[in-house]
Image (spheres, helix red, strand yellow):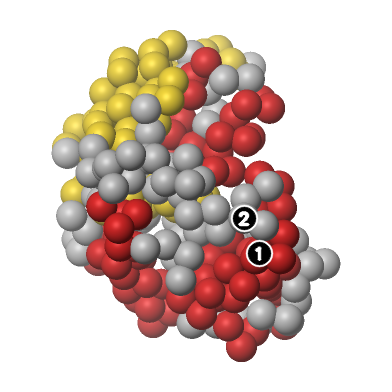
């Protein structure tokens, strides 16, 4: 095992610098995001205030263009606010430069994409090891063992040495989830993670998400269009025209 129950309960930082307390992990304050377009300014987020605590499973829903993905991109640091503040795990990430953001993200947030984004020339286990290599997490001789532990956690350890093109879409998504867990981040952010999966596989992936929240003490944010899945989470945030209209 790479993480003990004591580490989860300990309110101080663990050996990898993660804050393990049951506390507010995400705090957005008056966040505005405006994009410059040929047709003029487009306001994607309008004064968003949002707090998410440790251990919450949150679904972000809304029509296309409502600001769902932009909101997730604020939290993951993939995009920056035009104004306002984004605090994640006690850190003001809106102040980071690109280099600081990349290192911080690799240690604190696991990002799961709709289209998996696995590197095709690396095996499944090598894809999972990549974030550890990038952030210099864990000892080099421990990284494959940790990757195998995570692949076993998502039930595809037997696919470890195959290329992504040699496994199914559902297995690729499981590998992407394992990669997101590589550095044991407190937060997992998933943008339409089941959008390209059949209903049976999507249900299995969602069950896995529930296990990660319940058993691994992860905080989960999931953008989804699936009403059935959103009805099963602890909290639903609905956006329309860049504003939170239901929480």
Q: Quadrant of the C terminus?
A: top left
Circle 2 packing at 10 Å, graded few (<14), some (14-19), many (20+), is some
- The answer to whether residue 202 is seen in the rendering is no
Q: Which mark is residue 138?
A: 2
Front-most of 90 and 29?
90
Front-most of 98 and 11?
11
Q: Which residue is mark 1?
A: 143
Q: Residue at x 55, y 82 (%)?
A: 156
Q: Are marks 1 and 2 in contact (CB under 8 Å)?
A: yes
Give how far across and how far down residue 44 sits, in percent: 43, 25
- Judged from the image, the secondary structure of the residue bearing numbered disc 1 is helix
| Horizontal relation, residue 152 to residue 21: left or right | right
Circle 1 packing at 10 Å, graded few (<14), some (14-19), many (20+), is many
Q: Residue at x 19, y 32 (%)?
A: 245
- Judged from the image, the secondary structure of the residue bearing numbered disc 2 is loop
| Horizontal relation, residue 238 to residue 132: left or right | left
Give how far across and how far down residue 67 sits, in percent: 40, 34
N-terminal of the pair, mark 1 or mark 2, is 2
For the residues labelled 1 and 2, the Cα–Cα distance comes to 6 Å
Q: Residue at x 54, y 53 (%)?
A: 183
- The answer to whether residue 166 is seen in the rendering is yes
Q: Residue at x 23, y 38 (%)?
A: 23
In terms of image quadrants, where is residue 121? bottom right
Give how far across and how far down residue 30 sits, in percent: 31, 15
In terms of image quadrants, where is residue 52? top left
């Amino acid at each position: 095992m790479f993480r003990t129950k004591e580490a989860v309960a300990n309110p101080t930082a663990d050996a990898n610098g993660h804050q393990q307390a049951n506390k507010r992990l995400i705090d957005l304050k008056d966040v505005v995001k405006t994009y410059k377009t040929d047709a003029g300014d487009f306001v994607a987020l309008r004064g968003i205030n949002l707090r998410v605590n440790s251990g919450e499973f949150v679904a972000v829903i809304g029509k296309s263009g409502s600001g769902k993905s932009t909101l997730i991109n604020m939290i993951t640091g993939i995009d920056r606010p035009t104004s306002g503040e984004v605090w994640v795990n006690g850190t003001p990430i809106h102040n980071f430069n690109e280099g600081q953001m990349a290192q911080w993200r690799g240690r604190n947030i696991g990002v799961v994409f709709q289209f998996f984004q696995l590197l095709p020339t690396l095996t499944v286990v090598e894809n999972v090891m990549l974030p550890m290599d990038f952030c210099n997490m864990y000892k080099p001789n421990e990284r494959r063992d940790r990757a195998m532990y995570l692949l076993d956690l998502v039930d595809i350890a037997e696919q470890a040495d195959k290329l992504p093109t040699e496994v199914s879409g559902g297995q690729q998504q499981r590998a992407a989830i394992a990669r997101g867990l590589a550095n044991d981040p407190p937060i997992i952010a998933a943008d339409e993670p089941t959008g390209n999966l059949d209903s049976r596989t999507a249900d299995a992936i969602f069950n896995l998400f529930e296990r990660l929240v319940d058993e691994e003490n992860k905080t989960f944010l999931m953008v989804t269009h699936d009403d059935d899945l959103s009805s099963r989470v602890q909290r639903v945030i609905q956006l329309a025209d860049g504003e939170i209209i239901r929480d």
